[in-house]
Amino acid sequence: MYKICSLSLLVLFLISGCGKTSQKRVKVKEQPLKYAKNFSITTENGYKVLHIKNPWQQGTYLAELVLDNKNETVPEKLLKKYTVLKTPVERIATFSHTNIGFLSLLNETKRLNAVGTPETIYNKDVYSAYKEGKVANIGSDLQLDLERLINTAPQLIMKSGYPQSAQNDEHLKSIGIPLVYNIEWMETNMLARAEWVKVLGVLTNQEVKADSVFNEIESRYKQLIKSTDKMKKSPRVMMGNDFKGVWYVPGGKSYKAELLKQINVNYFLANDTTSGSKAFSYEVVLDEMMKSDIWLYSGSVIAKGELKTDERYAMFKPVKENHVYGPFKRINVRNANDYWESGMGRPDLVLADLIAIFYPDLHPNYELYYYKKLN
């Protein structure tokens, strides 16, 4: 132990760096995010680290990867804490079609070499690559083709995360390929969901482009919200659909409810604190449907322009007045719906659709992009 006898000696000791036995503090710098809460990107010892948070267990992570784009030996202190992933990732396997939408925004879909349930992919380039044998079909979460996944040798596997993901995906983790979860669906507003494009940006070394793309989308989104400020009418909406006799509607803290609140649309659960769906009896729904101007339907359709019929619908005010809409305009012949593929990365287009639905006089020449009036 050093014995410091005077202030001058202490200053000399600090300046000269004589305390060689002390540990060098690791500097951690976090990249600021504007909206997303379920991932973060930090820098440690000059390396970027991607953290995918576990929203169901505070303070824990579903994945943490140190991103190596230097072709150097990663420091031992980082190897002990994180999984190493070489970037830019050249071969990505994804079970989540949302990633296809994000990669498309960055013009990086060529990095996909394996996909789950390819028959439900909307993106023409990715689907064509699958048909040509350039992208492998690795099944689905429930029917995974593990052997084919291993044979395609992806550098990274991406899939949606759920509360039991850690236990259910042990077979995926056992093959030694880094696994990244998508938790964007747990974000409580659409800009936060769209900000997940930055995850794909850091994985493909396209951080600057991802920031630029997101900033442009955010700017358009805010301009659209501002365009509704002077609208005096506050239309009333009902959302959701019936499933086996129970009506499921978005909670008041869901991204859908938050979006409608921003454009002054009246939703009966606006003050609710639920971020997921809520279940109601038909009686509650009927009472609300008798007062609502518009029904945003999200269930199944016979065709992309037709509701599944139910004689009870005839009592609903939006049905009587032909004001039922759903995100079914961009559905192809294979029943793949682009709303769930690219729509989560384009909240500006989703918002533009909703403004046109609720305030048709505001942008009279606007043509709906994702949404469609249903018969």
Image (spheres, grey):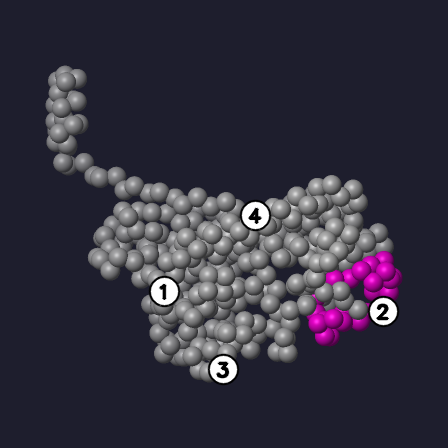
- The residues bearing labels 1 and 3 have C-alpha atoms spaced at a distance of 23 Å
Whether label 1 touches label 3, CB < 8 Å:
no
Amino acid type at mark 4 = Ser
Query: What is the spatial separation of the Cα atoms under label 2 and label 4, in whole angstroms?
Result: 43 Å
SS class of the residue under badge 1?
loop
Residue 112, image x and y in percent? 43, 71
Q: Is residue 245 visible?
A: no
Task: Give the residue number, with chain letter if any, for mark 3.
Answer: 131
The residue pinned by badge 2 equals: 311
Asked if labels 2 and 3 touch by Cβ distance under 8 angstroms, the answer is no
Q: CA distance from mark 1 to mark 4?
A: 29 Å
Give the amino acid type for the residue marked by disc 1 in the picture: Val
Is 172 displayed left or right of 122 in the figure?
A: left
Of pointers 4 and 3, the one earlier in the residue sequence: 3
The three-letter code of the residue at mark 3 reads Lys
Q: Are marks 2 and 4 in contact (CB under 8 Å)?
A: no
Residue 219: mark in rendering? 4
**Residue drawn at x 78%, y 49% as measured from the top left:** 235
Examine the rendered structure and indicate whether residue 245 appears above or below residue 2.
below
Image quarter of residue 85: bottom left
Magenta stretch bounds: 299-326
Which numbered disc, 4 or 3, marks the residue closer to the eye? 4
The residue that label 1 is drawn on is 89
Percent across and percent down for residue 73 are: 21, 57
The kind of secondary structure element at disc 2 is helix
